[in-house]
Image (cartoon, rainbow, N blue to C red):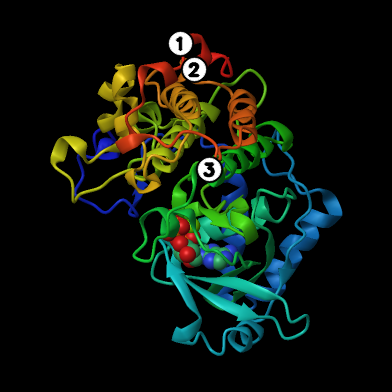
Amino acid sequence: MGCFPCLGGSNKQSKKKINSSNNQNNDQADSAADTLETTLNDDVKNEESKKAVDQSVAVQQDTNYKVDRDVRMDAIKATSFTFKELQYATENFKPDNFLGEGGFGKVFKGILKDTAQVVAIKQLDRNGGQGIREFVVEVMTLGSVDHPNLVKLIGFCAEGDQRLLVYEFMPLGSLDDHLHGPRRRPIDWNTRMKIAAGAACGLEYLHDKMNPPVIYRDLKSSNILLGEDYYPKLSDFGLAKVGPTGDDTHVSTRVMGTYGYCAPDYAMTGQLTFKSDIYSFGVLLLEIITGRKAIDFSKRSRDQNLVAWARPLFRDRKKFYQMVDPVLQGQYPVKGLYQALSVAAMCVQEEPSLRPLVADVVKALDYLASQTYDPQTQRVQNSGRPTPSHRPDVNDNEQNVS
Ligand SMILES: Nc1ncnc2c1ncn2[C@@H]1O[C@H](COP(=O)(O)OP(=O)(O)OP(=O)(O)O)[C@@H](O)[C@H]1O
Ligand SMILES: [Mg+2]
């Protein structure tokens, strides 16, 4: 796949998944999915899936199941539910409980009978064979993570040909809904920076704290879910990849992800690196700052792709004010805007080696999130245009990103 589909040359909706089949050889991290996927496909045939999945889980727990030659996964902590239990929880998938729909199926709100816990239940589309792999990866990856900025997987159901995932319920929905949804309400600058910092923290956990490290591969605003007080958590690890080990710098994979967020280098070569996630993070940060979609087909063609629209503006500091979301009505700190844009610009650089490491992004955004802006006491920008006296110098902008 060339880079153009990712950069807005496609007519497909931004939600549409990218899935080409280049570089399937050496796809070492998929072997885990393949192993369990085979188990699940066999299950579908013999109708004893739940039992078999339970056995797969037991294998993991008992023998620290080997994912591939070099990599071991932690034991899965998620609970196995029956389909009947999830039917009960969602009142038989009642339309009133419908929360949304993505590339792999519908999501419903539910209440678990035994614990009264409110959950979100994703029912994988049974027509899309692709979903089985994502299901397995999701159960394996999310079942073994534990971080405040990652959505918890409570359990799963694999019964007959049904595949469902049960997550903690995130009451404020997705960041995408808040930025672009029909009932969008403006999120203030401080909250935006906190959301960005929390998302970076979740990504840092995947890249730097998990063993083996994980490349997220599907970072986007619809996968940032919000709890009380807009507390952000990353969701959907269905596309996650176990990262390179040893001296390797990348894993080769089928190109997957979402238009507009996909790094051009990954789209062109299929070589997935941690820097592919950093590019997607840069797009997300731009979205948070500007309120614009990663891909927006309602705009004229040269403005449809957010990064392509932003690149010329990055080059001219005097134009930075044009990039801030107009719904903020000038209520943002000029210096903070410049610094946030600096981070975004570094993350979306064409050359992957020039993009920062996630730890540096976390540092920069933690700093920005700590700089509380108060429109009562601090200057509100008229029509977003900063006065010369409020323009920070170059060093100010780059001091927090290494
Ligand atoms: N844990 C959750 N709590 C509350 N709402 C959720 C939860 N998970 C998903 N949703 C809602 O369901 C919608 C669809 O989610 P889903 O992950 O299926 O699709 P998506 O993120 O838009 O695309 P993709 O399939 O690429 O992830 C979300 O936008 C969100 O509004
Ligand atoms: Mg999602």
Question: Can you see residue 249?
Answer: yes
**At 41% across and 26% down in the image, what residue appears?**
348
Classify mark 1: residues with Cα within 10 Å, few (<14), some (14-19) or many (20+). Answer: few
- Identify the mark at residue 282; answer none if there is no mark: none
Q: Kindly identify which residue carries mark 3.
A: 376
Residue type pointed to by label 1: Val
**Three-letter code, disc 3:** Gln
Residue 360 falls in image quadrant: top right
Disc number lying in front (3 or 1):
3
Above or below, comparing residue 51 to residue 150 in the picture = below
Residue 338 location, x and y as percent?
Answer: 44, 24
Q: Nearer the viewer, residue 78 or 246?
A: 78
Mark 2, residues whose alpha carbon is within 10 Å: few (<14), some, or many (≥20)?
A: some
As measured in the structure, the alpha-carbon distance from the residue carrying label 2 to the one carrying label 3 is 24 Å
Q: Earlier in the sequence, mark 3 or mark 1?
A: 3
Give the residue drawn at x 64%, y 42%.
202
Task: Check contact, mark 1 vs mark 2: CB within 8 A.
Answer: yes
Q: Is residue 131 visible?
A: no
Residue 397: numbered disc: 2
Q: Residue type at mark 2: give it.
A: Asn
Distance between the alpha carbons at the discs numbered 3 and 1 = 27 Å
- Residue 92 x/y as whole percent: 53, 89
**Hey, which residue is sitting farthest front in the picture?**
377
**Residue that badge 1 annotates:** 394
Up the image or down, 317 lies above or below 82; here it is above
Report whether 84 appears left or right of 1. right
Tell me residue 272's x, y (percent).
48, 31
